[in-house]
Each structure stands twice: as C-alpha cells, then as structure tokens.
Amino acid sequence: MRRSSAQGVLYGQTVANVAGIANSDLECMDILYLEGRVTAGRLAEVTGLTTGAITGVIDRLEKAGLVRRERDEADRRKVFITVVPEAIDKLSQFYVPMQQAMEKVCNGYSDEELRLLLRFANEGYKGVVAATEALKGLLDTPPEKRPALKLKTFRQP
Amino acid sequence: MRRSSAQGVLYGQTVANVAGIANSDLECMDILYLEGRVTAGRLAEVTGLTTGAITGVIDRLEKAGLVRRERDEADRRKVFITVVPEAIDKLSQFYVPMQQAMEKVCNGYSDEELRLLLRFANEGYKGVVAATEALKGLLDTPPEKRPALKLKTFRQP
DNA sequence: GCTAAATCTCTTAGTGACTAAGATATATAT
DNA sequence: ATATATATCTTAGTCACTAAGAGATTTAGC
C-alpha cells in the first residue's frame, strides 16, 4: 500500500505535467471535484497551504479557465470556488489510463470480494484521516514525551 | 481509494513538516528505504525530478545526517546513496500514528481477508505503475489522436 | 591503444510557488 | 458604536525546481 501510494503521487505529478498546471493546482482541482463548491479558506485548510498560496492557486486555475470565483451573497467576505464544467472533461482524460488499469485489476474479483475491498477502502480512509490528526497532535508534544512505540516493519520477499 | 490517496499525500506533507525536511526529500527517503542502496540517477528517474534537483535533495539530506554519499568503486561516475541507520529511527516515529491506525483497521479482518487485501494491494500497485507508463505514453500522442474513452464516475452516497 | 560518443553527477542562472506578515473588507459581539 | 473576529488578498523575500551545460569516467569503434 505504501508503494501504491508513492506511485500514486507520481501519477499525479505526471498528470499535472501533461495538463500543464502546477502540482498543488491539480490537488485543489481534486478536492474541488470531491467536495464540490468550497471556499478559498477551506482549500487552504484541506491542502495545508496558507491562504496567500491559495490565492495564487486560484488565480492560476481561473486564468487556465478551470474554475470560477463566486462571492457568497450571504457573507460577502467569502469566495466560493466552483469548477467549470468543461474542466472535468479536460482533466478526466488523463485519468483514463489509471481507470483502465484499476478496472482490469478489479475484474479479477467477485462482487463479494469487491464489497470487502470497498469496506476496507472506506475504513482505511478514515484511518488515514485519524492518523493525520494524531500526527498533528504530536507536533505539540515535546520530543521526549512522545510515545516511543517500536515500529514493526514488514518487508515483502 | 482516491480519497485515501489524497489524504496520504497530506500525511506525508505533515511528516515532512514535523521532521523539518522538504517534501521531496522525504519522498526520496521513502524510496531509499524501500529500494535500499540506489544511485542518484535512479532517484531522479523514480521521483521524476531532474538530476540537478536530486543533487540538491541529497545535499540537504546529507547535511541533515540522514544519508551518505558513496562512490561506486566499480564505476566511479556513479554515486550510491545509503540511508544512515539512525535515520530510520528518527523518521519512523512519525509513522507510528499511521501504523497504529492501520493496525486498528486491519484487526477487523480475518487472515483470509487480509490475504485478499494483500493480493489486491500488490496487483493495484502493478496497475498504478502500468497506468503511469501509459500516461507518459499519452504525452507523445497528439491530443486529437488520444483514445477518447468515456469515464464512468461513481459517487459514494 | 586512441579518439569519439555515451553515461553519470554536479554546477549555474533563472523561474515560480511558497511562507510570513500585514492590508483590506465584511461580519459579529459587547 | 466601537472593538474584535473572520475571510481573502497583497507584498517581499525565500527556497526548491528546471534547463543547459561542465566535468569526470566509462564504453565503443577503428
């Protein structure tokens, strides 16, 4: 899973290259696609970038015609970012190789097995979110007070 | 899986922050850990960075006392990068939250189910590698000649 | 054996995304 | 009505990255 994750990062880098946008710009497009209409601040929160950096991201994405800024009429300080419909078409083609590969892999499993994999994927996601929170908590703990757990490492043959 | 992957990227960013090294420096440490002793050129190849950038990465990692440069005696142009043993201890603590979370998730599965998950993880990894290659191939194909496959998208309820 | 081409890492100059700090505009609380 | 909080943007400066090429070593051709 670690290997897949590392390789997944590389896939994303390649997509960004091919699409001609920066890496974090693509990451934001991904978040926008998954979460829908979000504010600039929410993007900063999720990506871990500063709001200043997000301004730059949105500027570039807007210039590339991939997103639009929309002021919230209820709270005029907020700026909602929405994906331009055509952007999905422009970008989705670069995920075709990945989807084909995954479809091929998934074909090797029964419906019941796929349900198990889906369950694991969901629980795994929640686990990663929890782990990220826990790690951030570690930041506030002085190094000498950190739980010094032995890491069991497994190496595949 | 996409969500997990995106969140995994964030976990890595957080680790890099906490460890006080750059993001790609950590990515290289990961590769070094997985592949063992590798050359500078191999790092460039795997990360997708230029050799010039890798020189910088290794400089910083060496300065931080995490890796060592070793000239290959057989071919003196090559420089092997090796991880300093203590580096593993320094960094592995930051993966404790992730491992705990994953262990917790895995505890919910029988040995047989875990074998299925392992098989999927292996096949999935190969799939991602294949997809990356295919995407790079797309780079050399003119846009109008690209296979315009309909992307089936699934949204979880 | 000697020259030319290839391979591998490093160097240099320039670019661009990032952070920190603060400005601006709007909203909420006392 | 004033102060404080919130949300985004601006600015100056920093740092990792690329492109191009230099330096060092190996391999191939004659």
Image (spheres, coloured by chain):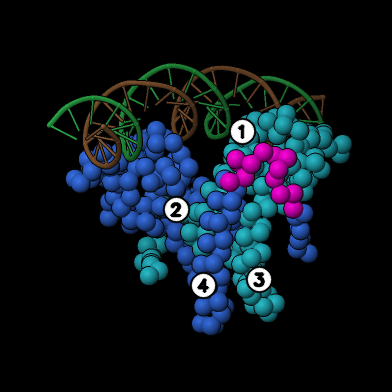
Chain colours: A cyan, B blue, C green, D brown
- Whole-angstrom CA distance, mark 1 to mark 2, is 28 Å
Front tag of 1 and 2: 1
Q: CA distance from mark 2 to mark 4?
A: 34 Å
Q: Nearer the viewer, mark 4 or mark 1?
A: 4
The residue carrying mark 2 is: A141
Decide which of tag 2 and tag 3 comes sooner along the chain.
3
Secondary structure of the residue carrying tag 2 is loop
Magenta-tinted stretch? B137-149
Which of pointers 3 and 1 indicates the residue nearer the eye?
3
Crowdedness near tag 1: few (<14), some (14–19) or many (≥20) residues, C-alpha within 10 Å: few
Q: Which residue is mark 3?
A: A107
Q: Which residue does the numbered mark 4 point to in the structure image? A: B118
Tag 2 near tag 4, CB within 8 Å = no
Q: Please give the residue where the numbered disc 1 appears in the rendered image.
A: A53
In the image, residue B144 lies in the stretch drawn in magenta: yes
Q: Position of residue A135 (x, y in %)?
A: 50, 55
Total tally of numbered discs in the picture = 4
Q: Report the chain holding disc 1.
A: A
Q: Is residue B123 left or right of residue B61?
A: right
Q: Nearer the viewer, residue B69 or D11?
A: B69
